[in-house]
Amino acid sequence: MSQQYIEVDYLEPENIQPRRRYDPDAIAAKYRYRPWVVLWRALRIIWNFVQFILGLKWDEWRNQVERNRFKRATQLRQILTRLGPTFIKVGQALSTRPDLVRKDFLEELIKLQDQLPPFDNKTAFAIIESELDRQVSEVYRQISPDPIAAASLGQVYHAYLHTGEEVAVKVQRPNLLKSLTLDLYLMRKSAGWLSRWLPLNLGHDLTLIVDEFGIKLFEEIDYVNEGRHAELFASNFRDDPSVKVPTIYWRYSNHRVLTLEWINGCKLTDTKSLCTAGLDADQVIQTGVIAGLRQLLEHGFFHADPHPGNLFAMPDGRMAYIDFGMMDQLEEETKETIVSAVIDLINKDYLELAKKFVILGFLTPDTDITPIIPAIERVLGDAVGQSVRDFNFKTITDSFSELMFEYPFRVPAKFALIIRSLVTQEGLALTLNPDFKIVEVSYPYVAKRLLKGESPGMRRRLIEVLFKDGRFQWQRLENMIAIARSDDNFDLLPTAQLGLQYLLSEEGKFLRRQVLLALTEDDRLHTEEVQRLWNLVKDDLKPGRLFNVALSSLGTMSTEQIAAILPLTAMMGDNKIEGIYEEKEQFLTPN
């Protein structure tokens, strides 16, 4: 590490040279000629789990299951710890699923989040000096003699810079790359072998999922990537006072050392600390869920590893994210498709939902979706039930695992991380409140996103949802408004203002025509539907605020836009229904 980098401005991480990326072919080439290394590792993994399974069976045979349950839970944690970072990651994922893992096992697996055995301080300080090309005492005025937390990939020290800032110093474990590449090689080999025997339509995608995991792991062990991710994440949430992202000190960071702002807060699984701090658990959950939805559906840049060790509730109620190693990016079309798929689920439009599965890659384009639609309806109809309170992701994933045996569903590699993120968040919410339903928060957010129509693509999705077979779906609009209003923070007026501006724009010319036709479908004026909508929104549309919004909207309109609404206003005001029908016929008659 050159002295030149040490002196660069902390806002310029581009000066750091990139590390090697995940390359499954290069890894395979490396271990192809080291069969003894691969065989020894495989035998070690198999032997550890065989011992564990035999121990469980022995307890059953001797009727000592209850007596030894804590012993077996500790044994599992120790096995995962001994096997290293890859298996610790698996344990961390399971530690957020109280609905899947017994409580005694769960309490042990939670320790994998930040209570792992640390490596020795001499090695850690040597890594700091090697990476930063300075003595530890030159970089930090004070640093804790021992790590305050140890995780799967590194450990954290509490320190102060010479300029007075309180910081956390992450130091990566030694020989990490060697351990990860060997395990990824074995996982990839196993995935290729298992795909031939599993009665699922996953096939090659099992290997792709391992590759996606490998890509993210390689990114996660490069702290320069993590720092860049943190800054992008902070930029995305700069207007959100409920989310905190620590500052990165680039002057004191490199590939294996990351210095970042110290965060004071309590772990989300520590309900006692939450209560002591006067924080409401349900409000903390809601803040986390909304932040997660914004990541997926608004910014497209999402945290793929949101376990409790990476999230803290601050005394002022903010949610702090402290680990940005495993992140991923969604394209705009994918975000829009997910939003409209959720709305299709709300509307129980399973034909459109099946089409979305094709677009998202869960079904191939040449798949005949006709026989699949009833199966989707059966699974999702049962999962959603009569109320969103009956919905959870475990129900969905369990039900879809059954569909995989019968129909050609597959899991796109990118969606493996999305599913992991959603399932982890739901598991975290269930830890704080076993009765919490993540969809009760998700539905209003998705409805709001679609109603606001903040991008051309989102407006197209809204039109697709509201019009089916050329007819306006009044009930769908009512459903979306009702669901959106179930969020106390939803303000209908700004959304109505955006809708009015779009309706009167050149882009909204088609929609103006369609609304006109919808109001006069079946040769009658649809006053009953309009009245129902008015009853739904009238409490939000107070005359004073409505007048101010109208003035604001008119102030942003051109003369042509104002003129566009006058004919419709005049016709409705004078009740000239004949004129409306004439306009309708003119629109329907081909040129």
Image (cartoon, rainbow, N blue to C red):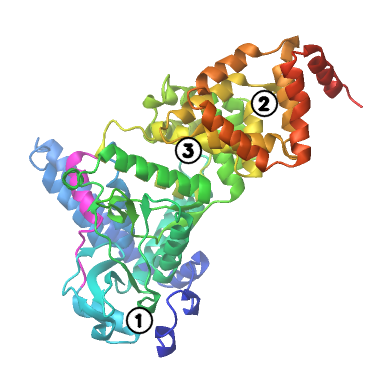
Residue annotated with mark 1: 131
Under mark 2, the amino acid is Phe
Disc ID at residue 199: 3
If the image is split into quadrants, where does the C terminus sit? top right
Where residue 144 appears, as percent x and y from the top left, is: 18, 73
Q: Are marks 1 and 3 in contact (CB under 8 Å)?
A: no
Is any part of residue 286 visible from this angle?
yes
| Residue that appears at 26% across and 47% down | 268
Where residue 10 appears, as percent x and y from the top left, is: 42, 76
Front position among marks 1 and 3? 1
Q: Which sits earlier in the primary sequence, circle 2 or circle 1? A: 1
User: Circle 1 — which element?
Assistant: helix
Q: Which sits earlier in the primary sequence, circle 2 or circle 3? A: 3
Query: Which residue is at the front of the view, 235 or 460?
Result: 235
Marks 2/1: CA distance?
59 Å
Please tell me whether residue 117 belongs to the stretch shown in magenta: yes
Q: Is residue 532 left or right of residue 55?
A: right
Front position among marks 2 and 3? 2
Q: Residue most toward the right?
A: 591
Query: Which residue is at the front of the view, 526 or 464?
Result: 526
Q: Residue most toward the bottom?
A: 3
User: Circle 2 — which element?
Assistant: strand
Residue annotated with mark 2: 467
Please tell me whether residue 558 belongs to the stretch shown in magenta: no
